[in-house]
Amino acid sequence: MEGAGVRLHRAIGFLEPPETYDPFLLLDDFRSDEPRDWQKGFPWHPHRGMETITYVLRGEVDHADSLGNSGTIGAGDVQWMTAGSGIVHQEMPRGDAKGAVYGFQLWANLPAADKMIDPRYRGFSADEIPEVRDPGGAVIKVIAGTVNGVVGAVRDVAAGPEYLDVSVPAGGTFSHATKRGNTVFAYVFEGAGHFDERSDTLVADRHLVSFDDGDSVTVRAGPSGVRFLLVSGKPIGEPIAWRGPIVMNTDAELRTAFEELQRGTFIKKKAQ
């Protein structure tokens, strides 16, 4: 349970040490057909020292923040928010005609040099996110990164991440080059597929695959096809001090952040 009472599935950021998926901290899957699971939403709350990436598949999420931004994230849209020195925002889901809200939120850490930069918000509609059709039959939505020379919608991000939504039809295969030294993982959310060429194990819905270091990822779809997020990024390699929505490098920095919240001095950049 998160926010004011949103029931979700946490794929990263639950029990493992925070450095495990460096530079990524958390991946939440908030897919539900039941309004009672999401309708209380995520009322006003702070962030500092990290980025939140919200990707909606069904329904809508209304948002507003201390910079004066507000709007709605609809199906296929992405919101990439850099909290930097501090931002306060809210995210309130609204179901589609069938009462469903599906989506993901990924948290990415910021290096120490960027922890206190001015916060910024970037929103991308579904039609701004390029789609690539791979020779192996896969369809890839390029949120961030590059596929077959096509550059994703989100650029100029500290971790230089790739964030792909990959659909592979039954019998199809998808291969993608990865950078050595990067953290790479896949999260399945439809169907099932083979993520290890040496194994016949099928990885199905709501399972995460963490890859060893290498030069590429190859996925072979199961009999019903497979759809998954493929995420990678360069590790920051710095100490992580993390408490709730604030991610810093030291416990002293965390204490300062929460003291500033109590004093009302947390927000460094006001709405224009």
Image (cartoon, helix red, strand yellow):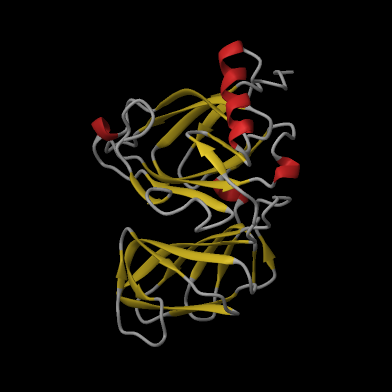
Q: Residue furthest front?
A: 252
Q: Residue furthest top?
A: 263
Asked if one can make out residue 80 in the rendered structure from this viewpoint, the answer is no
Query: 246 left or right of 4?
Result: right
Closer to us: 245 or 144: 245
Residue found 70% across the figure and 50% down from its top = 158
238 lies above or below 61: below
Q: Residue furthest bottom?
A: 198
Residue 210, position as x, y percentages in the image: 45, 67
Q: Quadrant of the C terminus?
A: top right
Residue 18, position as x, y percentages in the image: 50, 50
56 lies above or below 175: above
Asked if one can make out residue 111 in the rendered structure from this viewpoint, the answer is yes
The image quadrant of residue 150 is bottom right
109 lies above or below 209: above
Residue found 31% across the figure and 29% down from its top = 5
Residue 188, position as x, y percentages in the image: 37, 62
The image quadrant of residue 93 is top left
Residue found 50% across the figure and 24% down from its top = 45
Closer to us: 141 or 180: 180
Residue 254, position as x, y percentages in the image: 58, 31
Q: Quadrant of the N terminus?
A: top left
174 lies above or below 247: below
The image quadrant of residue 39 is top left
Closer to us: 149 or 105: 105
